[in-house]
Image (cartoon, helix red, strand yellow):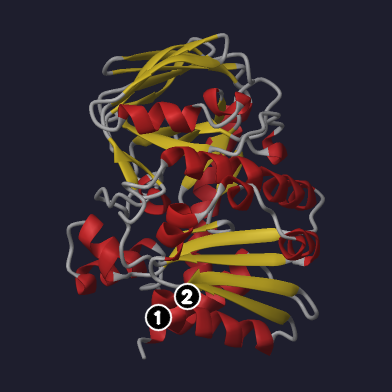
Amino acid sequence: MDPRLRKWAILLVDYSLGVKKDDVVLIRGTTEAVPLVKMCYEEVLKRGAHPIVRLSFEGQSYTFYRLAQEHQLKFISEIDRVTARTINGLISIIGESNTKELTNVDHKKVAMARAAYREIRDILDERELKGEFRWVLTAYPTCGLAQDAELSTEEFEEFVYEACGLNHEDPVAYWKQVADRQERIVKLLSGAKELRFVGKETDITVRVEGRKWINCCGERNMPDGEVFTSPVEDSAEGYIYFDFPAVYSGVEVTGVRLWFEKGKIVKATAEKGEDFLNKMLDTDEGARRLGEVAFGLNEGIKRFTKDILFDEKIGGTIHMAAGASYPETGGKNKSGLHWDFIKSMKDGEVYADGKLIYKNGNFLDI
């Protein structure tokens, strides 16, 4: 066994979640990710907590969306409600062997199920805001993810370990250093009332006054490396072009262009996947508003992988999410959708209240 696998589980259990005795921790993953699921299960038990494991099998999502009727798509079991009200921690491990299995399913079905799941998301968001619940998301290096990244499985495995800081003798110490640097950026942004993003086919302004910036340093995502907030819901004005592909539920959309008026996406086009894009944006009323604006800061992630867990952290990028906002930032937008779109800022600029603070992918004076 690669010793970094044990270090990974310890990092998730101790650093990301801070698991304590008698905590109830849900470990959710695919059958492909069993080695890491098992390690996390062991580490949770060692801390006197109570692990619950839920595994999904290959093709499960495809089978569901192919066969489910409307009443099944909208169904939320009482088991899921009780789980959401009970667990103290959630470890979600991405690990699909086929990341494209939902490409040809009925996208209206996907949107319907996402909208129904909003009930569970609201419960978890409320409990997280009260400090009763914590979560972390990571990705196990499967053949499917490696193929998307155009790497061998072995190369992708090394990429993941490096991105997570697991090649360091003490990964916890490494992420604490990341936290310190990003905290300086948070302080800079916290004084801004309005941000303007300028770049290729882009000139968009959002208000962030009264909103809290979050320092993402491995406590929710692993790997991590970003700072984000939720903009004022009716504030987005202008247009933006996202030059990175956007992947949602295994469907790839490229060349996304969005136009905003009074905070709402009034027009959305794409070079590929435009129909899917607009169907997802029509999930519910909140899906056409911004739930997040963020800066990617992980210089260790140097390539696009088609996995948002890694790609939104790429150094020198920004990303904006359509849909649900984060209550801990002061965000109020609710939606069954939260879809991140990524843009390179290597030739871009960001202004805070009219002052240039970021240029060509880097913050100035940080």
Q: Quarter of the image for the N terminus: give it.
A: bottom left
Q: Nearer the viewer, residue 141 or 296?
A: 141
Is residue 362 in sight in this rendering?
no
Compared with residue 62, is residue 266 higher up or lower down, i.e. above or below?
A: above
Compared with residue 361, is residue 347 higher up or lower down, i.e. above or below?
A: above
Q: What residue type is labelled 2?
A: Trp
Compared with residue 66, is residue 231 higher up or lower down, i.e. above or below?
A: above
Q: Is residue 314 left or right of residue 231?
A: left
Tag 1: Cα neighbours inside 10 Å, few (<14), some, or many (≥20)?
some
Residue 358 lies, in percent from the top left, at: 40, 26
Q: Which of 191 and 340 is in front in this view?
A: 340
Could you tell me which secondary element the residue under label 2 belongs to?
Answer: helix
Could you tell me which secondary element the residue under label 1 belongs to?
Answer: helix
Which residue is rendered at x = 82% and y = 50% of the image?
A: 130
Residue 195 lies, in percent from the top left, at: 51, 18
Which residue is rendered at x = 48% and y = 28% of the image?
A: 281
Q: Which of 110 and 42 is in front in this view?
A: 110
Give yes or no for contact between labels 2 and 1 (Cβ–Cβ under 8 Å).
Answer: yes
Which residue is rendered at x = 61% and y = 74% of the image?
A: 13
Q: In which quarter of the image is residue 80?
A: bottom right
Q: In this view, does 216 lie to the left or right of 299?
A: right
Real-space CA distance between mark 2 and mark 1, rounded to the nearest whole angstrom: 6 Å
Tag 2: Cα neighbours inside 10 Å, few (<14), some, or many (≥20)?
many
Is residue 30 in sight in this rendering?
yes
Q: What residue type is labelled 1?
A: Arg
Q: Which mark is residue 201?
A: none
Q: According to the image, label 2 marks what residue?
A: 8
Q: According to the image, label 1 marks what residue?
A: 4
